[in-house]
Amino acid sequence: MSERRAGPHNSIVDVAGLAVGNAGDLRLKSGVTVVIPDEPAVASVHVMGGAPGTRDTDLLAPEQTVDRVDALVLSGGSAFGLDASGGVQAFLREQGRGFAVGDVRVPIVPGAILFDLLNGGNKDWARHPPYRELGYRAAVAATAEHLGLGSNGAGLGATTATLKGGLGSASLLLPNGVTVAALVAVNAVGSATVGDTGHFWAAPFEIGAEFGGFGLPAPMPPDAAIPRLKGAAGDAPVVGGNTTIAIVATDAVLTKSEAKRVAVMAHDGLARALFPAHTPFDGDLVFALATGRRMLTGGLPDLVRLGIGAADVLARAIARGVYEARPAQGDLVPAWRQQFSAT
């Protein structure tokens, strides 16, 4: 079996034809991340959390008419963050992009949000939430170059049960030449690390030392299987007060139905990296995006390998999002590097 290899950036920008942009506000402790394909790309979505917040995701069902999107948006801000897609849409309209309806073009920009309203940031924005402007700024900043991880974009104010969350990404080069990658904002009710240690649940899937190279603890702590839940030490977890939202992308040619299956399989990576996952308190969601640069010539087995790879990169991206988070004034939980930098 050939060695698993990440792409040159080990991020979603390793998928040819994608640009990613971040915008955030340190005082707000929140932000927006956008993925913009060079050309409209096939997309679908699968939701497994109990409290999702979304925009325009119904049109991504395989039986719906529109089969391609102009961008995908991940945002903080809970329901207020749904405005971010409008800002991205405004930018794309300036570029003349969008689904043609007569002589009008409507940019197709599905989005998903996470809850970061109680993370210590100042949310006193008066009449107009800032997310439309943050979405526009993220779109303007979109680039195919190195992507800032950790406390950036939609992950700027993210938290988990025990540590700060963050924006994570990872990529994988499959033996058939296809690239698959993930981008995720980690804001889980559960934990990305084992028990009270700094070891990541995703350790078996790590490539190199992309999130420290510490492996799993040996022996496993006797209390490792006891869930750590955000709010459990004080208030009970809040329904909809969490959510891990992700995009898995590939340069393969996929139909909407195939993209849907990749999104479904990618959720396995979320469950491997977070304990627990898919709870009533999370709105866990995965978009799948296909730029269509490479044919899958091996039939359904190739689609299976792609789905396995999608779960792989999502698990690694989640760990990287937590690992790369940085401490900031007003944080309510510590960053991994504050607690375990000498692990």
Image (cartoon, helix red, strand yellow):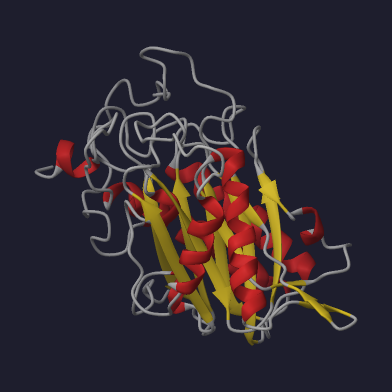
Residue furthest front in the image: 127
Q: Is residue 129 above or below residue 213?
A: above
Q: Residue at x 63, y 79 (%)?
A: 94
Q: Position of residue 162 (x, y in %)?
A: 32, 30
Provide residue 167's location: percent of width, then percent of height.
39, 54
The image quadrant where one finds the N terminus is bottom left
Q: Quadrant of residue 93?
A: bottom right
Q: Where does residue 31 sit, x and y in percent of width and height? A: 44, 51
Q: Between 334 and 105, which is closer to the camera in this rendering?
A: 105
Q: Is residue 324 above or below residue 281?
A: below
Q: Is residue 265 above or below residue 159?
A: below
Q: Residue furthest left?
A: 342
Residue 134 placement (x, y as % from top left): 48, 57
Nearest the viewer among 203 and 44 is 44
Q: Is residue 257 visible?
A: yes
Q: In the figure, is residue 165 to the left or right of 246? A: left
Residue appearing at x 37%, y 79% in the figure: 145
Q: State the residue at coordinates (63%, 75%).
A: 92
Which residue sits at x=42%, y=63%?
22
| Quadrant of the frame with the C terminus | top left
Q: Number of labelled discs?
A: 0
Is residue 316 visible from the viewing direction of this image?
A: no
135 left or right of 301 in image: left
Please indicate whether residue 46 sits to the left or right of residue 165 in the image: right
Among the 4 quarters of the image, the one containing residue 300: bottom right
